[in-house]
Amino acid sequence: MTQAIFDFLHSIGFRHPLHPALTHIPMGMVMGAVTFRMVSFLPKFRFLAKTGYHCVILGLLGVFPTVFTGYLDWQHTFGGQWEFLIILKMVLAVALTIVLATIAYIDDPESPRLDKTSLLYILIIVLAIGLGFSGGELQYG
């Protein structure tokens, strides 16, 4: 299946990996979620907590196509070979998905507080940084 997808893409002139383009969705949403959450602690900007929460939801939705295209690129480029950085990316992606889902379930964006939910927001940025760094190392060495 993977080869058929890439053969089709090559036949129409698209020769790039699929995964990098989609990483901007969850990674950008994570950055936005954390930024909006932190700014929402300023009294005049409390309304931005809801925007941060919406970023979490969109980021969570974006994880699935990003992971799928990462799998396709891994199969196509690396032949499914297990390497430390691939395993690390898989672990971090699962962790990010779980933490985003947890935030989506427990957060109350109508009344943001500096509590464990805010710590989960900080955790998602750490996970996103780990994913980006390991992906860059994998691709560019």
Image: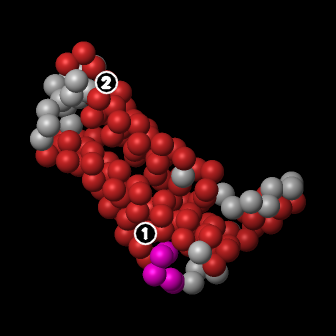
Q: Residue at x 47, y 48 (%)?
A: 27
Q: Residue at x 35, y 51 (%)?
A: 125
Q: Is residue 83 magenta?
A: yes
State the SS at label 1.
helix
Residue 78 in the image, given as x and y percentages of width and height: 63, 78
Q: Quadrant of the N terminus?
A: bottom right
Q: How many marks?
A: 2
Q: Which residues are magenta?
A: 82-86
N-terminal label among 2 and 1 = 2
For the question of whether residue 61 can be seen, the reply is no
Residue 80 in the image, given as x and y percentages of width and height: 58, 80
Q: Which mark is residue 48?
A: 2
Q: Quadrant of the C terminus?
A: bottom right
What's the magenta bit mostly, secondary-structure-wise? helix
Report the side of 95 relative to 109 (left or right): right
Kindly identify which residue carries mark 1: 90
Residue 93 in the image, given as x and y percentages of width and height: 41, 62
Report the side of 73 relative to 93 (left or right): right
